[in-house]
Image (cartoon, rainbow, N blue to C red):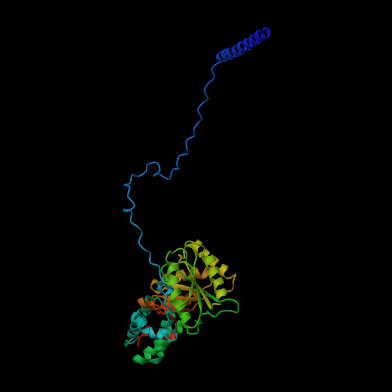
């Protein structure tokens, strides 16, 4: 019995102790300070779309279209074979007119403009009495034709002596007399051969120089035709970089006869282009390199010095065989002033007289040769591609005095 009571007491003590612990723990939990709720996570917004020009700031409003409303690109035609591809036509290479006897064939153009000189002189010489007034008229006729004062005085003096010796004069005798004296002034003994044959290791180099408006680029192109007609292979150097159309114009001339044109940027260094042209001529084994230079006023010292530089740079490859001065025959005595200045800067080896068919002042041939001691080698007698002719003294004088 006592044992049972002891067990019951122990059981009550255990139950009461457990209840106290639960109550104590509850009281402790109530005494703890309230905990803060966890802070909400920070959400980073996605980066904005990059702006593209002004349209991103103010997007254009467009009407949305369905897929049925959007037109599809049309079918592209692709050539099935290579033959269907159209290529630009190749330039037609022309066969220039032979230069032999070209001046004779063009003599009619020359005589139409020069007959004033020949007929005027023959009319005066045919007078029954050749007094001092008549000889002064003869002098005026020659000077008006730009023969020059000194050559005119020489011609008149010789004519007076020969007419005095002959006495009676027939028209045929007068014509023969005048022809002989004019031919003496033109001087057939001058060397008029164009040096365009290549050397052992380099081509012949020809520089074309002159003032603005004399037709240098056209003359260079026509000269290329002259050389091709004579069997030469030609390279053109477009060293006129100041005139925008000069290189295009020269290249067109070259393509017509199958000659390559070396060119550079507009406003580039002319000496560099001339140097490259000769270099290309050496690489191709060409016979002749023609260098077209920019027109320059003979009064502009800087431009004239630049012309001398072009010549010096080209000579690093080899000698410059020809320096041709292009003169406009219609400028008359002013052309002589230009010629003197150019001759001081570069050694002129020959004269090209252009527009000789459009002036009655053919005496400029005599005057410029006498002034420079340099022969006229080529003359221009029209705007046609083959109207540049080698100068032939006999044919020229015959054209001056007419038939």
Residue 51 image offset from top left, x and y in percent: 44, 43
- Which residue occupies 37% across, 91% down? 173
Q: Looking at the rendering, which quadrant does residue 139 occupy?
A: bottom left
Can residue 358 be seen from the camera position used here? yes
Name the one closer to the observer, 28 or 269.
28
Eyeballing the image, is 302 above or below 41? below
- Which residue occupies 55% across, 72% down? 280
Residue 301 image offset from top left, x and y in percent: 50, 62
Residue furthest out toward the right? 3
Residue 140 image offset from top left, x and y in percent: 36, 77
Q: Looking at the rendering, which quadrant does residue 75 occupy?
A: bottom left
Can residue 150 be seen from the camera position used here? no
Name the one closer to the observer, 344 or 181.
344
Residue 167 image offset from top left, x and y in percent: 37, 92
- Which residue occupies 32% across, 50% down? 66
Eyeballing the image, is 295 above or below 360? above
Name the one closer to the observer, 394 or 28.
28
Name the one closer to the observer, 3 or 301.
3
- Which residue occupies 52% across, 23% down? 37
Q: Quadrant of the N terminus?
A: top right
Residue furthest out toward the front? 1
Q: Quadrant of the C terminus?
A: bottom left
């Amino acid at each position: 019995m006592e044992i049972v009571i002891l067990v019951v007491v122990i059981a009550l003590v255990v139950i009461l102790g457990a209840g106290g612990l639960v109550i104590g723990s509850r009281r402790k939990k109530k005494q703890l300070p309230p905990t803060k709720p966890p802070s909400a996570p920070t959400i980073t917004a996605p980066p904005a779309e990059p702006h593209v020009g002004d349209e991103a700031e103010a997007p254009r409003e467009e009407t949305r279209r369905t897929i049925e409303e959007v037109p599809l690109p049309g079918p592209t035609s692709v050539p099935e074979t290579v033959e269907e591809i159209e290529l630009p036509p190749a330039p037609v290479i022309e066969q220039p007119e032979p230069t032999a006897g070209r001046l004779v064939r063009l003599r009619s153009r020359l005589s139409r403009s020069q007959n004033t000189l020949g007929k005027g002189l023959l009319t005066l010489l045919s007078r029954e009495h050749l007094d001092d007034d008549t000889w002064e008229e003869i002098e005026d006729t020659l000077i008006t034709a730009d023969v020059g004062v000194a050559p005119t005085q020489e011609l008149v003096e010789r004519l007076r002596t020969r007419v005095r010796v002959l006495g009676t004069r027939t028209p045929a005798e007068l014509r023969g007399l005048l022809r002989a004296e004019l031919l003496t002034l033109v001087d057939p003994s001058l060397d008029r051969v164009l040096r365009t044959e290549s050397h052992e290791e380099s081509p012949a180099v020809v520089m074309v120089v002159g003032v603005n408006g004399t037709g240098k680029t056209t003359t260079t192109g026509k000269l290329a035709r002259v050389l091709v007609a004579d069997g030469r292979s030609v390279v053109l150097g477009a060293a006129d970089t100041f005139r925008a159309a000069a290189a295009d114009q020269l290249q067109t001339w070259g393509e017509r006869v199958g000659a390559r044109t070396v060119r550079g940027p507009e406003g580039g260094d002319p000496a560099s282009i001339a140097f490259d042209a000769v270099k290309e001529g050496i690489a191709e084994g060409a016979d002749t390199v023609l260098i077209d230079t920019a027109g320059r006023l003979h009064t502009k010292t800087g431009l004239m010095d630049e012309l001398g530089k072009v010549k010096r740079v080209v000579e690093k490859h080899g000698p410059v065989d020809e320096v041709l001065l292009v003169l406009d025959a219609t400028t008359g005595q002013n052309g002589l002033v230009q010629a003197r200045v150019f001759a001081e800067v570069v050694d002129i080896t020959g004269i090209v007289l252009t527009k000789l068919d459009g002036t009655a002042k053919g005496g400029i041939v005599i005057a410029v040769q006498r002034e420079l001691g340099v022969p006229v080698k080529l003359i221009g007698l029209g705007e046609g591609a083959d109207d540049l002719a080698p100068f032939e003294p006999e044919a020229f004088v015959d054209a001056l005095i007419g038939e």
